Image (cartoon, grey):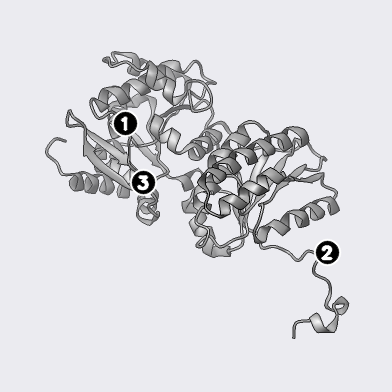
Amino acid sequence: MPGRLPADRLAQNLAALKKAQPEYWEWLNAADSQNLVELTQALDGAPILIVDGQSQDSRRTPEDRAWATLKSQLAAAEGPGDLGPGPGEGLRPKEAEAKATIEDPGPLAGQSRAQRAALGRPLWLFGLGSPLALWRLLRETSAAAGPVNLYEPRAAVALKGLSALDFSAAIAEGNLVFWAPQDLIDRAPTPKSLLLFHPPSARGQKSQFERLSAFLTGRDRRALPKGRAPKILIAGPLSGGPESMGPALLRAGLALNYPTELLRWSDEARDLAGQAQKGDPAAARGLLALAALEAKRALAAFKPDLTVALAQAPFDGPTVVELKKESDSLFALWFVEDFRVFGYAAEVAPAYDLFFHIQGPYLADRARLWGLGRAYYLPPAADPGLFRPQSQVPLKYRAL
C-alpha cells in the first residue's frame, strides 16, 4: 500500500470492480459528479477526504478516530432485531464521536462479527467518507460473517475513496460489496441488518441515510387496510405555475371520493416566499422552517396516507425526512417542471417515497442514477373545471 500513487490504487480497485461488480462499475462511470472531493493527508500521513470543503476525518489521527467511532456503534447494537444506531434514533453521529476513544479495538470487532454470523445479521456501512474506517473494519474482522456492504450514494466520493487505499483483494474475494442508489430498486429488504455509519457522511446525506435505513427494515413498504380509500394531503407551492394544480388535485381527489385536503399556507408563509424570491437568504430559511411547522400541524390533524408535494413546494430534503419521521404518510413529489432548469430535483427527490415527472424516458434513466426506484411518468391531465369540450367554448377563444 505505501508508495503507490492514488491513480494506481484507483485503477486496481476499478479493475476488480469491473470484474466482480460490473453494474457498480458502470454506475461509477455514468453517474454525474455533484460534489467537489479532494484527497489529502493528515498530520500522521494517513489519507483523508475533503468533501465540498469539509474534512471527513480528524486531521491528526484519522485511523484511530474513525475506527473508534465504528467500534462504539458495534458495541451499541443490542440484539437481532436492532438495526443499529443512526442519526435520529439510538446513538447519533455526534454521540458516537463523543463516546469514541482512541484505543486498540482488541477482540471486540471479531466477537461482534462472530455474533452477527450466528444471528444471520448482514453488516452495512453507510458512507466512504473515511476510507481508513472501512480498511480497519475489513482488516480487524472475520470474513466468515459475510461481506461488508458499503452504500455510498456520491459517485465522486466513492471514486476518491477508491484512490486512497487498495481494496482490490477484498472486492475480488467478495468480502466487500459496493451498492449504488439504483441497486436498492426492487430489492427485498434485509431484516436484522446491522447498519454502521460514517458520521460526516450520514449528516451530509440525511435523505439517503434514511432511505437505506427504510430499505433495510422494510419500512418503505406500507399497505392500506382492504376497502379503505386513501387519505391524501396536497402540498403545493406558494407561487409559480404549479400553484394552480393544488386546487385542481383537491377537486380531483374529492371527485373520486378520496378524503383529500389541500395544505393552506399562512399569509406569513406567503410573505416570506415573496421576500425569498427577491434573494433574501434569511427569508428563505424562515420559509423552510415555517413550512415544516405548518406541514407538521396538517399531518397531525389530517393523518394522511399519502402526501403529494408539487414542484416548488417549500420543502428541502432534510425537511421531508423530518416530516416522514413524524408521520406514517407516504410522501410523493410530482415534479411538473423541467429538471434541467430546476436542478434541485436531484437533491430533494431521494427524500421522497415516490417520484412523478413529466419528461418521460428522458428523465427515467436519470432518475435511476439518482436512486429513485419508484419514479413514474405522469403528465398532467386536463382539469374539466378549466378545460371544456370545444363545443362549449366560444368561437373566438377556440384554437384554429
* Classed neighbour count for the residue bearing mark 2: other residues with Cα under 10 Å, few (<14), some (14–19), many (≥20): few
Q: Mark 2 — residue? A: 385
| Label 3 vs label 2, nearer the camera | 2
Task: Give the Cα separation between the discs numbered 1 and 2.
Answer: 58 Å
Q: Secondary structure at mark 2?
A: loop
Q: Which residue does the image show at 56% across and 45% down from the upper left? A: 283
Q: Which mark is residue 357?
A: none
Q: Mark 3 — residue? A: 21
**Quadrant (top left/top right/bottom left/bottom right) for the N terminus:** top left
Q: Which mark is residue 134?
A: 1
Which amino acid type corresponds to the residue marked 2 in the rendered image?
Gly
Which amino acid type corresponds to the residue marked 3 in the rendered image?
Gln
Task: Give the Cα separation between the discs numbered 3 and 2.
Answer: 53 Å
Is 392 or 149 nearer to us in this picture?
392
- To which quarter of the image does residue 293 belong? top right
**Residue 343 locus on image (x, y percent):** 49, 56
Specify which label sits upstream in the sequence, 3 or 2: 3
Specify which label sits upstream in the sequence, 1 or 2: 1
* Classed neighbour count for the residue bearing mark 1: other residues with Cα under 10 Å, few (<14), some (14–19), many (≥20): many
**Residue 299 locus on image (x, y percent):** 71, 36
**Residue 353 locus on image (x, y percent):** 60, 43
* Vertical arrangement, residue 292 with respect to residue 367, above or below: above
* Vertical arrangement, residue 369 with respect to residue 62, above or below: below
Q: Is residue 100 visible?
A: yes
